[in-house]
Amino acid sequence: MYFFLLASLLILLRFGFPLLKIRLCDSYIQDCYSTLDRDKYRILTNYSILLPDHPKKLVHVDLVLSLYGIFIIKRSPLKSTRVLYGDEQGEQWSTGKTLPNPILQLKPGVKHIKAVIGDLLPDTAIPYYPIVLLYPKLKGIQLMRPKDSKIQILYPKTLVATITAYQSQNELLTEEELAMLVKTLQASAH
């Protein structure tokens, strides 16, 4: 009896613990979003974008629409906490197991959001901030990246501080424009 319980516990720790960490991080990210000022930020989680090159493939991102710019966040939950190796332009990254490059998954999403918003507010220079959110925390990250890369790679713990750091800039949108963006993006989601 004890052997069965011990074996079950070991299996759960080995295979269930990474999934538990991912679920806890997802919950933590939702809590982070809820701390943002609702007058200045609107959140669209799990926003689905149909890839133009692959008509049956969707990319899911979180959008933080703000008076200061648009944050396009690709969540990348990892089942390993080992060192992450990869190249920003490479198809695959590795933590011992290969995974699709989240930066390459994020780029079509950024392009789609820019197109939708550009059609709606063509005269407004809205900055876009693409972010890859890795979790749980890794032992290290070794990525080859161009120096001019605009994509930020963050852990959930630094997400709100990164987003709110842009509040020091002038407001680029009105609350009415922000509400209009939310409505338009919700209508264009797949």
Image (cartoon, grey):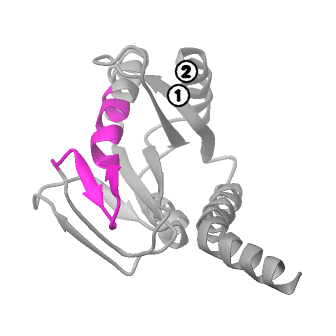
Q: Which mark is residue 189?
A: 2
Q: Bounds of the magenta span?
A: 89-111
Residue 159 in the image: state x and y as whole percent.
Answer: 50, 64
Q: Nearer the viewer, residue 157 or 53?
A: 53
Magenta stretch holds residue 68: no
Marks 2,1: beta carbons within 8 A: yes
Q: Quadrant of the N terminus?
A: bottom right
Residue depicted at 52% across the width and 40% down the height: 63
Residue depicted at 62% across the width and 41% down the height: 42
Residue depicted at 62% across the width and 28% down the height: 179
Q: Nearer the viewer, residue 100 or 179?
A: 100
Q: Circle 1 — which element?
A: strand
Mark 1 sits on what residue?
Answer: 48
Residue 125 picture quarter = top left
Q: Is residue 147 left or right of residue 167?
A: left
Label 2 CA crowd tier, 10 Å (few <14, some 14–19, many 20+): few
Residue 16 in the image: state x and y as whole percent.
Answer: 66, 66
Residue depicted at 64% across the width and 71% down the height: 17
Q: Is residue 30 above or below residue 61?
A: below
Q: Is residue 145 above or below residue 178?
A: below
Q: Identify the mark nearer the N-term, 2 or 1.
A: 1
